[in-house]
Amino acid sequence: MPLLQTKTLSATTYLGIWRITESAEELKILLMALRPMVELPAFKSETRTKEWLAARVLAYTLLAQITPEPVLIHREETGQPVCSAGHIQVSLTHSGPWVGALVSGNCGVGIDIEMRGNKVQKLISKFLNEAEIAAVAGDVTMMHLFWSAKETLYKIYRQKKLQFKENLLLPPVELQTTGQFMGTVQTYNLHQTYAVQYEVMPDYVLTYVLKEI
């Protein structure tokens, strides 16, 4: 699995992006070397199997930078990943061959990667409200950025029952290769703003959020 990039965001916070080139069997061997006790789910799709395996190989590789303990990643009822060591936070993402992981020993985390393509144009009305559609002004890269940012906000919130158009709100953004903007999670009893970090790459758009605990 070729490592595209890793970032040390703090002494206990690490981000990694990898590109899957291995077979499912090769990824399984890598995962078993890191966590021989992990239970492997049975997916019908080989693509889904490789995504699941690769995300965990990456996450466990990063977690080794935080603790030597063999912590395990489980799924909450919401579908979000959670570490068996409760003080360590983890977020995973995948899109096409790209896999991302963000782990931290002192921050809540959310990460999303979106492979650049054409399908986002067909989905824009499902995840952006009218003001956000006006803000992206037909720019496909901006559409990917806003889509990714809303996925990241959804993950940092860690609860179900959020409507992307009504509860996840983004301001107009002056697009750069890397940058930051504020995103808001708004419900009937919550108005929380987060700093969304982003990177625009030739093949994908990446966003992530760190929340102090």
Image: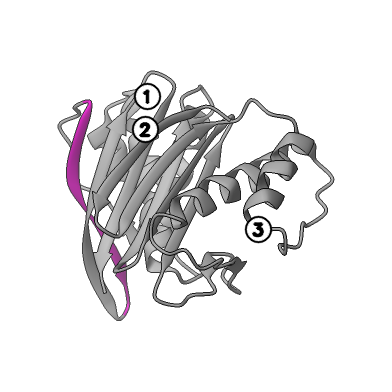
Q: Position of residue 116 (x, y in %)?
A: 46, 25
Q: Which residue in the structure is indicated by mark 1?
A: 140
**Furthest residue to the left?**
174
Q: Nearer the viewer, residue 12 or 194?
A: 12
Q: What residue type is labelled 3?
A: Arg
Between the C-alphas of marks 2 and 3, the distance is: 37 Å
Q: Which amino acid does label 1 sit on?
A: Val
Label 1: which secondary element:
helix
Going from N to C along the chain, the mark reached first, 2 or 3, is: 3
Looking at the rendering, the stretch of residues picked out in magenta corresponds to 177-188
Which residue is pictured at 51% across the width and 68% down the height? 69
Picture layout, residue 121 above or below residue 11? above
The answer to whether residue 145 shows anywhere in this view is: yes
The majority secondary structure of the magenta stretch comes to: strand
Between the C-alphas of marks 1 and 3, the distance is: 40 Å
**Furthest residue to the front?**
68
Q: Position of residue 134 (x, y in %)?
A: 26, 35
Which residue is pictured at 48% across the width and 75% down the height? 85
Label 2: which secondary element:
helix
The answer to whether 38 appears left or right of 104 in the picture is right
Looking at the rendered image, the quarter that the N terminus falls into is top right
Circle on res. 35: 3
Residue density around tag 1, few if under 14, some if 14–19, many if 20 or more, within 10 Å: some
Residue 45 counted in the magenta span: no
Tell me where residue 12 sits by quadrant. Answer: bottom left
Circle on res. 63: none
Q: Which of 67 and 121 is in front in this view?
A: 67
Q: Which residue in the structure is indicated by mark 2?
A: 143
**Figure disc tally:** 3
Q: Nearer the viewer, residue 23 or 128?
A: 23
Looking at the rendered image, the quarter that the C terminus falls into is bottom left
